[in-house]
Amino acid sequence: MDCQAWFGLGAGALRRPAAVGGRGKWSRALCFAALAGLSLLGCASYSEHTKEARSALDAGDADKALKLYNERLEVKSAKELPKELSGDNTLLVLERSMILQQLQQYALSSRDMQVADKQIEILDFDRKAIDDIGKYLFSDSTGPYKAPFYEKLLINTQNMLNYLQVGDLNGARIEARRLAVMQSFIANHEGQGASLIGPGSYLAGFIFEKSGDPQEALRYYDEALQFDSFHSLTPVVVRLAAQASYRTPRITKILDANAGAPAGPEEPAELLIVVNNGRVPAKIAKRVPIGLALTYASAFISPAQASQANELALQGLVTWINYPVLDKEKKVSPPLVKVDGRQQPVELALAVDSEAKKAWDDAQGAVVASAITRMIARVLAGQVAKKAGGDSTVGMLLSLGTQVALTANDVPDTRSWGTLPARIATSRLTLEPGRHEIEVSVGGSVRRQTVELTPGGWAVVGVTALR
Amino acid sequence: MGWTFGLNGVARAALLVAVALPAASTVLGGCGGSPKAVRGSDVQGLDDEAMGTGLDRRDLQQMLHENMESLQKSALVKRWEGENRPAVAVLSMRNETTEHIDSVLNALITEVETSLVNAGHVRVISRDSQPEMIKEVQKQQSDAFDASTVARLGNQVGVRYFVTGRVYNADERQSDERRVQYFLFMRVLDVQTGDILWQNSAGLTKAIVK
């Protein structure tokens, strides 16, 4: 008798006459064991699938990480997109884009981000009620990937950086406008605070400033200042305010504080260095004691569910809950930036790891609650199966099999944009036109680059070190 | 001989839970059919279907048709008829949208040139014959438009009129919808005076809805 027939999948299986002796019982047990083994093999979580690539990045081997992502996407090289962009492939493409950025393959990185940007939007629209129900019944990983807000805002931010590095203001402006659309959507749904993204607004301001639109540039710079006090923006705001009428209390305050200060050059040659440093903590699957899980989820489950879970815990039927957590944060040292041999000031534009933690803290309660609900459903299904089989070995096997099958398919949702940097830092300098040597030390490696600045010209140098 | 486990309805339900739910969860994970290449002429309505919020051939033709119809009805065409086919150059269409549609806009320039050539009122100076100068004009236009510079450069290229334009949009997103309203704005400039002799805007909407 095969497993499929045993589960009653074949026609008339439930009415099949059979003399069940000891041999039959053991064959069923073997079937269950095989099923459990097979199920477990096929149900690794997202972070387990991408663990080797993350380890390669930790070792500073971005080429290997890229190769592993390409294998996962079933493509021969980064020039290719996967045949299907549904499901986790969109997230894999997004993760690949940052590795391509680190490898200075900006055109491919930009294409990956554009594709993922659109697809993540489609996934948002495609999300159905059944996906949410599925999270409470089947598995945490049910349904399409839903990116948290900070990830959505960082797609356009990082793509602006890609375009700026190749001097494409037109492409960068499009990304800046896309960022504004996303910010408006988030502000309408979550409040303005959630829509702010310091480096995004900073880069958008830079893009419109260098596109000859001081009014729009001031608007974006003001948004960046609302997020954080970027001291490098003070002379920029003073200079642009002489060309544009846009004012807010923040801009007026800067102008008042700098009234009478000597004016800088009208058309300075400027260098903007953006450093993507470290990596956000990945989500990993973790087993936590049921008592602790109930504490996390207390605001998200009903008293009846809590009491049911407690009862099962007391009976010793449930001791652990399997759910995703953020991996330990790694220490990230600030980058060291030198231009023509002299060390330059660096500003922290965004602690992405803190944003990831904040987003996870907000989501954690509901995630644990759904894990507890699934756990209760599994145990109850097992009890029903046991009751049906009686106190015999068969009953125990039925109960075990039911729980094993459901547990094996319950995969903690460890999906996240794990190749985002932990920190984004900037260094902005006004320089004499001509050739300049740049040296950025970050994450144990040193990147050297030469830039040629024309009078009134600009250059953006991005350094990405995802270790 | 009967079913020796004595499975009742409850047991069957339990078994179904054990087997069907994991299967359902797998299905929820997503299964797709194999992709295949098709020819537009073989699949009815293929060119009518919107594939996203970007601009496609049909969108361009619709907006261009509306603008060119307006141009043909304008007083400018009568002026051109009296000038014995003056020289015209079509500049780049500036992309002020939230979509990366630059390759589509390059195709639009060719469509505009084709339309003008076939109407027969003007001589169209090919961009290929004056690449450096046109590039300079486009550079002027792309970042900070300076009419006097364009006029100077227009004289150097040897054209009497420039056709120029831009595409912009109003892009809004809601929880289950993204709506992008496009506007193709075109105008004709007199190189000598910088006067705008004709302008028109055509619009259309693309959206992703649930």
Image (spheres, coloured by chain):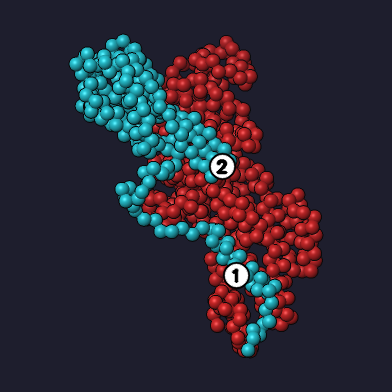
Chain colours: A red, B cyan
Q: Which amino acid does label 2 sit on?
A: Asp
Residue at figure coordinates x 51%, y 45% from the top left: A122
Disc 2 sits on a residue from what chain?
B
Residue A238 in the image: above or below residue A401: above
Residue at figure coordinates x 27%, y 28% from the top left: B115
Given the current orientation, which residue lies at the most extreme left position?
B84
In the picture, the quarter occupied by the N terminus of chain A is bottom right
Q: Residue B4 is drawn in which quadrant?
A: bottom right
Left or right for B168, reference B176: left
Residue B111 image offset from top left, x and y in percent? 29, 31
- Mark 1 packing: few (<14 Cα in 10 Å), some, or many (20+)? some
Residue at figure coordinates x 70%, y 64% from the top left: A377
Residue B131 image offset from top left, x and y in percent? 24, 27
Q: Pick whichever, A159 or B197, lies toward us.
A: B197
What residue is pinned by disc 2? B176
Q: Do labels 2 and 1 share a chain?
A: yes
Q: State the CA–CA distance, disc 2 to disc 1.
A: 34 Å
What residue is pinned by disc 1? B19
Pointer 2 or 1: first along the chain = 1
Q: What residue type is labelled 1?
A: Val
Residue at figure coordinates x 55%, y 52% from the top left: A144
Label 2: which secondary element? loop
Left or right for A130, reference A341: right
Residue A426 in the image: above or below residue A414: above
